């Protein structure tokens, strides 16, 4: 069972990380060490070549991983990203992008996880992300 609800997480994210509101990213589901997030398709997210810009995809992945981490440790706002590695695998469609995050290991000071990014309604990965979060002393 998650230690934080989607509504609680959204409130933290929107107040502490204002860019989330601008991007329109939202949490769809939070489980025990998992989270699903969505970035809505918007024309202003496109870069030359007609693909969603990398920074939007990275923000979505980081947002989803933050939710997955807080699902296990609770409302610890100062848990922060220490590493995020993204592999862009294929061009996203002109549709919403979904992020599926999952913790791989949760320690006392670090959380390690992965995020898979998909175009809405498609099965092929558009990007694969690994991430590490630093957890402050509780």
Image (tube, rainbow, N blue to C red):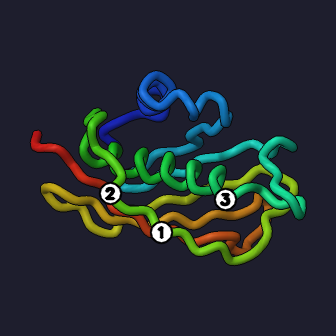
Residue carrying label 3: 54
91 horizontally vs 63: left or right: right
**Which residue is at 81% across, 55% downward?**
47
- Dot 1 crowding, Cα within 10 Å, few <14, some 14–19, many 20+: few
Does 104 appear above or below 75? below
- Dot 3 crowding, Cα within 10 Å, few <14, some 14–19, many 20+: some
Residue carrying label 1: 85
Look at the numbered disc 2 and give the secondary structure of its residue: strand
Is residue 122 in view? yes
115 horizontally vs 25: left or right: left
Give me the C-alpha separation between circle 3 and circle 1: 12 Å
Give whichever of 123, 15 is nearer the camera.
15
Does 104 appear above or below 94? below
Does 37 appear above or below 74? below
User: Where residue 107 appears, x then y in whole percent?
Assistant: 17, 61
**Which residue is at 53% across, 27% downward?**
18
User: Where residue 113 appears, x then y in whole percent?
Assistant: 38, 65
Residue carrying label 2: 82
User: Where residue 80 appears, x then y in whole percent?
Assistant: 32, 46
Q: Earlier in the sequence, mark 3 or mark 1?
A: 3
């Amino acid at each position: 069972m998650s230690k934080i609800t989607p509504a609680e997480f959204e409130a933290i994210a929107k107040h502490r990380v204002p860019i989330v509101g601008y991007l329109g990213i939202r949490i769809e589901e939070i489980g025990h060490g998992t989270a699903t997030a969505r970035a809505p398709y918007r024309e202003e997210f496109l870069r030359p070549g007609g693909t969603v810009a990398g920074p939007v995809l990275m923000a979505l992945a980081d947002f989803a991983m933050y939710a997955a981490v807080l699902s296990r440790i609770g409302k610890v706002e100062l848990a922060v990203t220490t590493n995020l590695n993204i592999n862009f695998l294929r061009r996203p469609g002109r549709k919403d992008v979904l992020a599926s995050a999952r913790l791989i290991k949760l320690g006392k000071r670090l959380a390690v996880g992965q995020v898979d990014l998909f175009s809405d309604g498609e099965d092929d990965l558009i990007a694969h992300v690994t991430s590490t979060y630093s957890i402050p002393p509780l």
